[in-house]
Image: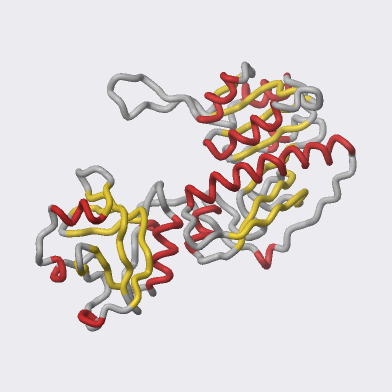
Amino acid sequence: MRIIFMGTPEFAVPSLQAIAARKNEFEIVLVVTGSDKPRRSKHADSEPSAVKTAALSLALPIFEVDDVTRPDFAETVAGCKADIIVVAAFRILPPAVYERAVLGAFNLHASLLPAYRGAAPINWSIIKGEKETGVTTFFLQQRVDTGNVIMQEKTPIDLAENASDLARRLAVIGAQVVVDTLHLIASGSVAVSGQDDSLASRAPKLTRDNTRIVWSQPVAAIHDFIRGLAMKPAAWTMLKGKTMKLFRAAPAGHLPEALSAAPGTLLVDQNRLYAKGSDGWIELLSLQLEGRKPMEATEFLRGFRSDAASSLFV
C-alpha cells in the first residue's frame, strides 16, 4: 500500500514511525510537513518540524508546504499515485489534495468525535473537566472534522494529567489506531459510521484571550484550566502589570484565616502560595513571571514581597 503521510508536530511522529516500521506492508512515498520555522536562538537560522526530523532519520522523501492550496502541491500529491493519505495534526486540506489518493484520505483526531471538533481537542477536553477522551480516525470530507468515523479508542483522563502528558499518551494510542485503520482499508473491510452533529462540541484554536484565567470561577474549574493548557501555551494572569504563566496547581481546601478574600487574592502561608477562586483556594506550584525563567512557587516566593495577601491577580 502506497501512503502519503501529512503531519507537523510531535503528536504525529509515533504514527509516522509506526507506519514506517511495517515496510513489508506499507510504503511511505512522501512525507508532507510544514516549512522550517525560525529558531529562538540567535545562532541558528531555522528549526525543522518534529515530523521532518523523524522523516529525515527514516530516510523518507519530504515535501514542505505552508499553503496547501498551491496548485503544485496538489500536482505533487497526484504524482505520487498513493493508495491512501494519512493525516495527523496537519492543515485543513482542500478536496483537490485529499481526493488524489485512490482509497481516499483519513485523519487522526485527538478526541472522541463528534466531541471537540477543532484545533485544540486535547486542551479543551481537560479544560472542560472530561474524565475520558481518546482518538478517532475518520475519512476526510469538506466540513472540518465531520467525516465518517473508521475507528475510535477510548482512554481515561487522570486528574493529575496535564495537556502535555495526555498528548504524549494519545500520540502512542493514535499510532496503533492508524496502523489498525490502514489494515482495515487494505483488507476492504472498513465499516464507517456517521457523526451525530447534535452531539458535537468545539475545540477552538488557543489564543491569548481564551487562555486567560478567570478567578471568579470555582477552584476545580481553575485547576482544570491550568492543567488543560500546560505546559504550552500555558494559562496566564496579570500580577502588578506583568503577565504570569501558571503551569501547575492543586486545589488547596480550607484556609479559614482568609475566607472573605476576593477572587484572585494571593495568600502566602508557610512558604506556600495560594490564590482565591470563587469557592476556595488553589495552591500555585509552578509558574513564570514575565521577564523571568519558569520556577517552582517556593523559589518565586524568595523574592516576593511580604504583603502578598494585598496582591491581586487580574
Q: Nearer the viewer, residue 129 or 66?
A: 129
| Residue sitting at the far left | 306
Give the position of the N terminus as an image quadrant. top right
Query: Residue 72: x percent and y percent?
Result: 62, 21
Q: Please, is residue 267 above or below residue 33 in the view?
A: below
Image label count: 0
| Residue sitting at the far right | 188
| Residue sitting at the far front | 270
Q: Is residue 161 left or right of residue 180?
A: left
Q: Which residue shows up at 65% across the image and 35% down it?
A: 15
Q: Please, is residue 230 above or below residue 5 in the view?
A: below
Res 12 → quadrant: top right
Query: Residue 227: x percent and y percent?
Result: 43, 57
Colour logic: secondary structure
Q: Which residue shows up at 34% across the image and 20% down it?
A: 44
Res 241 → quadrant: bottom left
Query: Residue 150: x percent and y percent?
Result: 77, 49
Q: Is residue 212 left or right of residue 31?
A: left
Q: Nearer the viewer, residue 156 or 55?
A: 156
Q: Which residue shows up at 49% across the image and 29% down it?
A: 49
Query: Residue 55: x percent and y percent?
Result: 59, 23
Give the position of the C terminus as an image quadrant. bottom left
Q: Which residue shows up at 56% across the image and 40% down it?
A: 11
